[in-house]
Image (cartoon, rainbow, N blue to C red):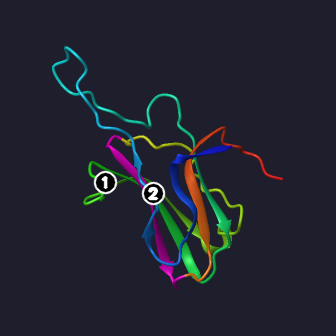
Amino acid sequence: MIFDLQSMFSDAQAITATAASTNVIDLGAPGTPMHAAAAITQDFGKGRPVEMRIQTVEAFDNLTSLTIAVEVDTVENFASPTVVASVVVPLASLVAGYVAPIQYVPLGTNQRYMRLNYTVTGTAPSAGAVTAGLVFGNANWSA
């Protein structure tokens, strides 16, 4: 798989408490095409799937589970985010190399900004890191 620096949410981001991804992806402002009566609506989850990869790059400890949510909002500071997909991952799965089951930009990704939010359940971990972003050629194999 190929990560692009401009399309990364987290680059080996240490998760030691509930936190948003380090980076936010700007999907662009919807506009009104020439000679159209209204602005177009956008949903980046429709059409050809846009691949994502959310992978544990350092094993977690202490916590009970980690909830990974894909959020969108109309403003970059995520004043009132909308969750378009989420997954709860138990500690036993959070080993180095684990890949979250959210593999494509979800339906409902229809606002300008997108990020991930990591919610820690249980004791705060002292170890654990995630790399995540949009990718080209998401590999579905392991060695």
- Identify the residue at horizontal 26%, vertical 27% (top origin): 40
Residue 135 lies, with reference to residue 85, above or below; the image says: above
- Identify the residue at horizontal 53%, vertical 34% (top origin): 49
Q: Give the side of residue 125 with respect to residue 78, left or right.
A: right
Residue 19 lies, with reference to residue 115, above or below; the image says: below
Residue 23 is labelled as 2
Rendered location of residue 112, percent (x, y): 32, 43
Q: Quadrant of residue 12?
A: bottom right
- Identify the residue at horizontal 54%, vertical 43% (top origin): 104
The verdict on residue 36 being magenta is no
User: Secondary structure beneath disc 1?
Assistant: loop
Please state, as top left, top right, bottom left or bottom right, where the N terminus lies in the image: top right
For disc 1, the marked residue is: 76
Disc 2 crowd rating (10 Å Cα; few below 14, some 14-19, many 20+) is: some
Q: CA distance from mark 1 to mark 2?
A: 10 Å
| Residue that sits furthest to the front in the current view | 5
Question: Magenta residues, as a range?
Answer: 110-124
